[in-house]
Image (spheres, rainbow, N blue to C red):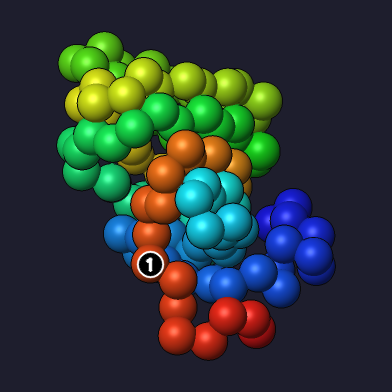
């Protein structure tokens, strides 16, 4: 997977079975998400929240945004407006970065690996 050691030292958690490294400044979060190539596809169910911006670093994600299905491959960027229903289907071998204007995931009890 493509994330450098500096990202891999961030607090680590999981979201729907996807490994997530979390940069948290107390108000916003950046999630560095990885689904290993030897893992099964993972679906993040339909949900809403504040604005989300993201980019696929490697692999692909099928995104359903406000009922519209889109395939996002390497280099694809997405911007999901606040409170728009959306879901993701992460393909094995996918890495992506997601920026949130809010805190989206709880930090693990230990802050670094």
The answer to whether residue 31 is visible is no
Q: Left or right: 92 with respect to 1?
A: left
Q: Quadrant of residue 107?
A: bottom left
Residue drawn at x 40%, y 28% as measured from the top left:
51
Q: How many marks?
A: 1
Mark 1 — residue?
A: 106
Residue 64: give x, y in percent of width and height: 28, 24
Q: Left or right: 66 with respect to 101?
A: left
Viewer-side residue, 42 vs 100: 100
* Callout 1 crowding tier (Cα within 10 Å): few <14, some 14–19, many ≥20: few
State which quarter of the image contains the N terminus.
bottom right
Q: Left or right: 52 with respect to 8?
A: left
Where disc 1 sits, the SS reads loop
Residue 83: give x, y in percent of width and height: 24, 26
Residue sitting farthest toward the front = 27
Residue sitting farthest toward the top = 68
Residue 31: give x, y in percent of width and height: 54, 51
Viewer-side residue, 19 vs 53: 53
Viewer-side residue, 88 vs 38: 88
- As displayed, is residue 19 above or below residue 77? below
Q: Quadrant of residue 69?
A: top left
State which quarter of the image contains the C terminus.
bottom right
Residue drawn at x 31%, y 59% as measured from the top left:
16
The answer to whether residue 66 is visible is yes
Residue 19: give x, y in percent of width and height: 49, 64
Residue drawn at x 26%, y 12% as measured from the top left:
68
- As displayed, is residue 104 above or below residue 13? above
């Amino acid at each position: 997977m493509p994330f450098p050691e500096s990202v891999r030292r961030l607090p680590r958690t999981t979201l729907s079975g996807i490994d997530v490294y979390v940069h948290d400044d107390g108000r916003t979060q950046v999630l560095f998400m990885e689904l290993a190539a030897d893992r099964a596809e993972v679906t993040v169910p339909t949900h809403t929240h504040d604005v989300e911006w993201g980019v696929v670093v490697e692999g692909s994600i099928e995104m359903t945004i406000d009922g519209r299905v889109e395939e996002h491959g390497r280099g694809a960027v997405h911007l999901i407006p606040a409170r728009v229903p959306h879901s993701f289907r992460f393909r094995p071998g996918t890495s992506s970065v997601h920026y949130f204007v809010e805190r989206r995931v709880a930090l693990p009890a230990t802050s670094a690996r």
